[in-house]
Image (cartoon, rainbow, N blue to C red):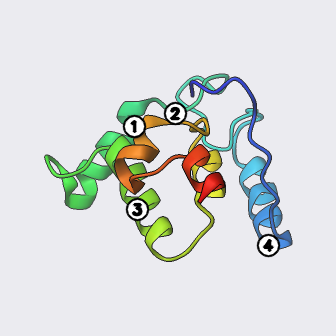
Amino acid sequence: MKRRTDPVVKLSRQALAMLADLKEISCGSRYVFPGRDRDKPLSNNTMLFALYRLGYKGRMTGRGLRAVASTILNETGFDPDVIERQLAHCERDEVRVRTTGRNTSQSASA
């Protein structure tokens, strides 16, 4: 990802238990979902081909899936600042301006 800081995400005990289970089968990798080389993450193409196998060939990409998730979460009332941070967008991200019609500086003054 292009961010300069790592995200901080509080996880439930259930999520932590799932991650512990995944760690046991990740072949000692530091990644939850390692690529073919356990020292590298999955490639972008891995996600793209998974979408193809799910029937979304020509209709969805990994980036598109992120945009759909952002739109749904924003429309259902989740905190837009939290959504953007989790998508590794900076606060003045132009994607946010395009999808929500506002940015953080506008929402702070509203």
Provide residue 90's location: percent of width, then percent of height: 60, 35
Q: Position of residue 42 (x, y in %)?
A: 51, 33
In depth, the one of 15 and 68 nearer the eye is 68
Q: Return the residue at label 4.
A: 14
Q: Which SS class for mark 3?
A: helix
Q: Amino acid at mark 3?
A: Thr
Where does residue 13 sit, x and y in percent of width and height?
86, 70
Cα separation, mark 1 vs mark 2, equals 6 Å
Type of amino acid at the residue the image marks with label 4: Gln
In this rendering, would 95 be left or right of 54? Answer: right
Quadrant of the snapshot with the N terminus? top right
Residue position for label 3? 71
Q: Given this view, does label 2 or label 3 mark the residue nearer the observer?
A: 3
The C terminus: image quadrant: bottom right
Mark 3 vs mark 4: which is more N-terminal? 4
Marks 1,2: beta carbons within 8 A? yes
Q: Residues within 10 Å of mark 3 (few under 14, many from 20)?
A: some
Looking at the image, which residue is at 77% across and 48% down? Answer: 23
The quadrant where residue 56 appears:
bottom left
Q: Residue furthest left?
A: 58
Q: Which residue is mark 1?
A: 46
Q: Residue 57 or 61: which is nearer the viewer?
A: 61
Q: Secondary structure at mark 1?
A: helix
Q: Is label 2 in contact with label 4 (beta carbons under 8 Å)?
A: no
Which image quadrant is residue 28 in? top right
Work out which residue is located at the far right of the displayed protein and give it: 13
Kindly identify which residue carries mark 2: 42
Mark 2 belongs to which amino acid? Leu
**Disc 4 residue crowd, few under 14, some 14–19, many 20+, Cα 10 Å:** few
Q: Earlier in the sequence, mark 2 or mark 3?
A: 2
Q: Residue at x 66, y 56 (%)?
A: 82
Q: Residue at x 30, y 51 (%)?
A: 51
